[in-house]
């Protein structure tokens, strides 16, 4: 639609359809020629998480305090890996001291790590974590179970130590008894070897006795029957 046709149609409309002046949008405020300079931002030294899921690795970064931890950083000072044994904490100590000197605020966790690594001196800050009541109860039960496990392991270790000592003492006594028995056997064998051997004297040759002759039984007297006398 051309401007001329629009003008003709507007003139032919009734007055109540035409837009009123009071419903018109107010004009925009004028833009100042020189906008004010943004204030200096408060910097902070903190950790920015990187890495895979359930395998966190952190960067030590310098960035404005109001920004998100994953936003653009002013400078990367190092990295921190708490999953290794021992933990891996690598930072540029001179740059850390420089930014602290410039007024950068350090997070509690990094402050404690800097003190552990002897980068700065001072007292450690308390690191407060916000946990739920149920999770707190689970942590307390886990701590109690850990203490109990340590005590049980200590008792088992002491029992094993006592048993090992008893076995060693019994083995020592058995070895000493075997040694004494072997020593006694050696002394007995030595005494037997040193004893003089007695040779038996030659016995005179005995003349074998004559065997007794067998006795002949005496002949029984034969009795003659008496003859009757005839007269």
Image: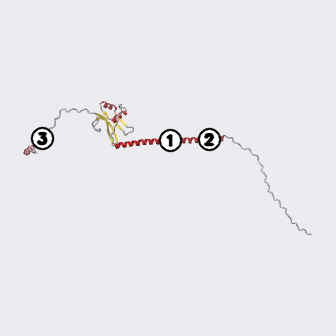
Task: Calculate the distance from the C-alpha at mark 1 to the C-alpha at mark 3.
Answer: 100 Å
Please name the residue that numbered disc 3 is placed on: 22
Q: Residue at x 12, y 41 (%)?
A: 22
Number of disc labels: 3
Q: Position of residue 119 (x, y in %)?
A: 35, 32
Disc 3 is placed on an element classified as helix
Q: Earlier in the sequence, mark 3 or mark 2?
A: 3
Left or right of 223? Residue 120 is left
| Helix, strand or loop at mark 1 | helix
The residue wearing badge 1 is 162
Viewer-nearest of labels 2 and 1? 1
10 Å neighbourhood of mark 1: few (<14), some, or many (≥20)? few
Say few, some or many: other residues with alpha carbon within 10 Å of mark 3 (under 14 / 14 to 19 / 20 or more).
few
Query: Left of 42 or right of it: where is 190?
Result: right
- Would you place residue 206 above or below residue 70 in this image? below
* Percent of width and height locating residue 68: 28, 38
Horizontal relation, residue 50 to residue 164: left or right: left
Closer-to-camera residue (60/20): 20
- Element under disc 2: helix
Lower sequence index among marks 1 and 3: 3
Q: CA distance from mark 3 to mark 2?
A: 131 Å
Q: Quadrant of residue 170?
A: top right
Q: Quadrant of residue 107?
A: top left
Please name the residue that numbered disc 2 is placed on.
184
Q: Quadrant of the N terminus?
A: top left
- Of the numbered discs 2 and 1, the one sitting upstream in the chain is 1
């Amino acid at each position: 639609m051309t401007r001329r046709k629009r003008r003709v149609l507007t003139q032919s409309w009734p007055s109540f359809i035409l837009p009123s002046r009071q419903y018109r949008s107010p004009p925009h405020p004028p833009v100042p020629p020189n906008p004010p300079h943004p204030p200096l931002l408060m910097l902070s030294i903190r950790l920015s998480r990187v890495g895979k899921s359930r395998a966190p690795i952190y960067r030590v970064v310098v960035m404005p305090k109001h920004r998100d931890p994953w936003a653009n950083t002013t400078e990367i000072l190092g990295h921190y890996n708490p999953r290794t044994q021992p933990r891996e904490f690598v930072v540029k100590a001179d740059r850390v001291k420089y930014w602290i000197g410039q007024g950068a605020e350090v997070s509690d966790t990094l402050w404690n790590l800097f003190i552990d690594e002897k980068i700065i001196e001072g007292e450690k800050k308390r690191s407060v974590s916000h946990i739920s009541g149920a999770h707190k109860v689970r942590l307390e039960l886990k701590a109690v179970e850990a203490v109990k496990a340590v005590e049980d392991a200590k008792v088992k270790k002491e029992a094993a130590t006592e048993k090992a000592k008893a076995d060693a003492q019994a083995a020592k006594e058995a070895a000493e008894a075997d040694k004494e028995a072997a020593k006694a056997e050696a002394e007995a064998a030595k005494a037997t070897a040193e004893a003089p051997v007695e040779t038996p004297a030659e016995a005179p040759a005995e003349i074998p006795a004559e065997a007794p002759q067998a006795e002949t039984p005496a002949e029984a007297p034969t009795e003659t029957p008496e003859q009757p006398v005839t007269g």
